[in-house]
Image: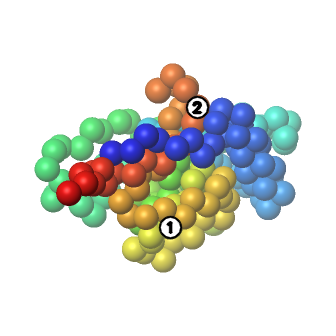
Amino acid sequence: MSEPKVVLDRDDMRRTLVRIAHEIVEKNPAQQLAIVGIHRRGAILARRLHALVSELLDAAPPLGDIDIAFYRDDVATRASAPVVQASHIDFRLDGLTTVIVDDVLYTGRTVRAAIDCVFDYGRPDRVQLAVLADRGHRELPIRPDYVGKNLPTAREERVNVRVEEIDGVDEVTITDTRSAEVPA
């Protein structure tokens, strides 16, 4: 495995989230907006976006977080039991534009599960998607409304989002997971 390549550092992440917050505010009426993060890192990014959006609007839209562990289409085929976190949506989603926040968009399966979960809490008028990194390789027809950074990657590469609250550092890295070839 190769050394990780940093593609977004702390300052880059902050600027990216500020830009996404501005885009969200520009496209949505304040009184009809809610922000919902996907556990784990998406929920942290959602809290950060919520603070930025609230500052821009001089009002705080509802904020929630969801755990999609049991909504995944591979829950029965995974080798280990899912780590389950509590979901917190203590407001009505009906009639709102709900912005789902995640760290990395890859195949689209996590987002599909998140949409299923959100609709168990109500029927938003619209669902939008904000991601810090979009690495491509979609398996489902899912496209983000707000993208921090497009990262064209190979399937053998891994995009790692680290956040201060969990990892002690804010950064996005790419790691090549292929084993180093041994010369013959």
Residue at image mark 1: 136
Q: Quadrant of the N terminus?
A: top left
Above or below, comparing residue 152 to residue 54 in the picture: below
* Residue depicted at x 61% and y 60%: 150
Determine crowd level at label 1: few under 14, some 14-19, many 20+ residues with C-alpha closer than 10 A: some
Figure quadrant of residue 98: bottom right
Q: In the picture provided, is 97 more to the left or to the right than 123?
A: right
The label on residue 170 is: 2
Q: In the picture provided, is 156 more to the left or to the right than 102?
A: left
The label on residue 61 is: none
Visible residue check, residue 94 = no
Element carrying mark 2: loop
Q: Position of residue 30 (x, y in %)?
A: 79, 50
* Residue depicted at x 51% and y 22%: 168
* Residue depicted at x 48% and y 62%: 153
The amino acid type of the residue labelled 2 equals Asp
Q: In the picture provided, is 74 more to the left or to the right than 3?
A: left
Q: In the picture provided, is 115 more to the left or to the right than 143?
A: left
Visible residue check, residue 55 = yes
Figure quadrant of residue 93: bottom right
Find the distance from the CA under tag 2 to the CA under tag 1: 22 Å
Q: Position of residue 115 (x, y in %)?
A: 47, 61
Report the number of numbered marks: 2
Q: Quadrant of the C terminus?
A: bottom left
Determine crowd level at label 2: few under 14, some 14-19, many 20+ residues with C-alpha closer than 10 A: some
Element carrying mark 1: loop
Figure quadrant of residue 54: top right
